[in-house]
Amino acid sequence: MGLASLSTLLLLLLSLVPLCTSSDRLAPAKPLIFPDRMVSSNGVFAMGFFSPTNNSSISRFYIGIWYNNVPERTVVWVANRDDPITATPPPSTTLAVTNLSGLVLSDTTSGRIYWSTRNVVAGGASSAVLLNEGNLILRSTNGTVLWQSFDHPTDTILPGMPFRVNYRTRLTGRLVSWKGPEC
């Protein structure tokens, strides 16, 4: 095989290799869509769309974080637990990083918003990252953390998660039990 043929073959093989992308983050131009998921860089946690029941007559989908390599899905955080997605499957529902509202879970066809971080940021958010500890963070363009799931626990405390007490108002963080849509 000649040098020209070898060079052509090498270029062809390199063109088949996908560009290196990280599956642990979302960017404004790269939303999370069903059935995709994000995986923390250490592979311990995953985030995506899930249905907590196998009952085909109950079609409720949520976006959440769970242990990635546990045979029975163990969900540790749910974003839209009060407003499930009822489309089956949710083909036009995305979790997107937006310039004005931070993270938004919405139906792109109807415009319905199921959940958002409600961050209004001058300059906008640049990415959402699922960290190795299971914390989903929203970062600004300069790297500042604008929002994090650890500040909004659902029913699970993970290592490294703060549990805050406001001594002035005597309010504490709260955990609310949730096993699924029926509970």
Image (cartoon, rainbow, N blue to C red):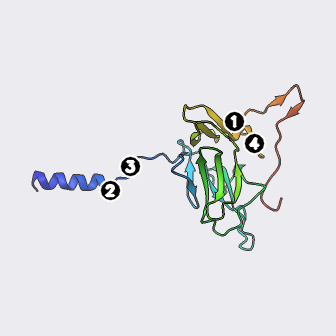
Amino acid type of disc 4?
Pro
Give the left or right position of residue 178, taking residue 67 as reference: right
Residue furthest to the right in view is 170
Please report the residue visible at 34 percent of the width from the left and 53 percent of the height from the top: 17
Q: Nearer the viewer, residue 156 or 108?
A: 108
Corner quadrant of residue 168: top right
SS for callout 4: loop
**Label 3: few (<14), some or many (≥20) within 10 Å?**
few
Residue topped by disc 4? 153
Amino acid type of disc 1?
Pro
Give the left or right position of residue 46, taking residue 150 as reference: left
Q: Disc 3 or 1, which lies upstream in sequence?
A: 3
Residue topped by disc 1? 159
Provide residue 48's location: percent of width, then percent of height: 62, 54
Please report the residue visible at 62 percent of the width from the left and 40 percent of the height from the top: 138
Q: Are marks 3 and 2 in contact (CB under 8 Å)?
A: no
Residue topped by disc 2? 16
Residue topped by disc 3? 19
